Image (cartoon, rainbow, N blue to C red):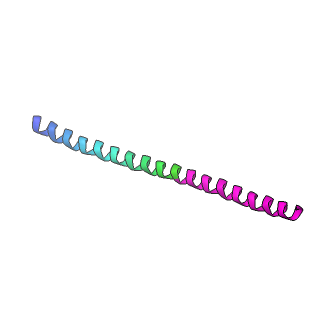
Amino acid sequence: MPLIKSRNKKSFDVRDEFQMAVEDISSIRELLLRVFNLVKWIINVVLCKVIKLRIFGHSLDKIR
């Protein structure tokens, strides 16, 4: 009986490890997605500021 229990426990541990690995992969994927969204947001903000500066810069040059 102890051998069967240890085998079952061993396979159960493997399943736990597999489940933890799957959760780690999904959490890493979620982290990468958040980082990607943050980078995309930063690029959008920088581009908007550059475009606004260029528009206002041109309009200021025309006023002068």
Q: Quadrant of residue 8?
A: top left
Outermost residue to the right? 63
**Nearer-the-camera pick, 58 or 36:** 58
Residue 1 in sight from this viewpoint: no
Highlighted magenta segment, given as a residue range = 36-64
**Which quarter of the figure is the N terminus placed in?**
top left
Is residue 7 depicted above or below 43 in this figure? above
**x%, y% of residue 64?**
88, 62
Q: Quadrant of residue 61?
A: bottom right
Name the residue: 43% across, 46% down: 27
Please indicate whether residue 25 sits to the left or right of residue 5 in the image. Answer: right
Name the residue: 87% across, 65% down: 62
Outermost residue to the top? 2
**Nearer-the-camera pick, 18 or 1:** 18
Please indicate whether residue 2 sits to the left or right of residue 32 in the image. Answer: left
Name the residue: 20% across, 38% down: 9
**Nearer-the-camera pick, 39 or 7:** 39
**x%, y% of residue 37?**
57, 52
Name the residue: 56% across, 54% down: 39
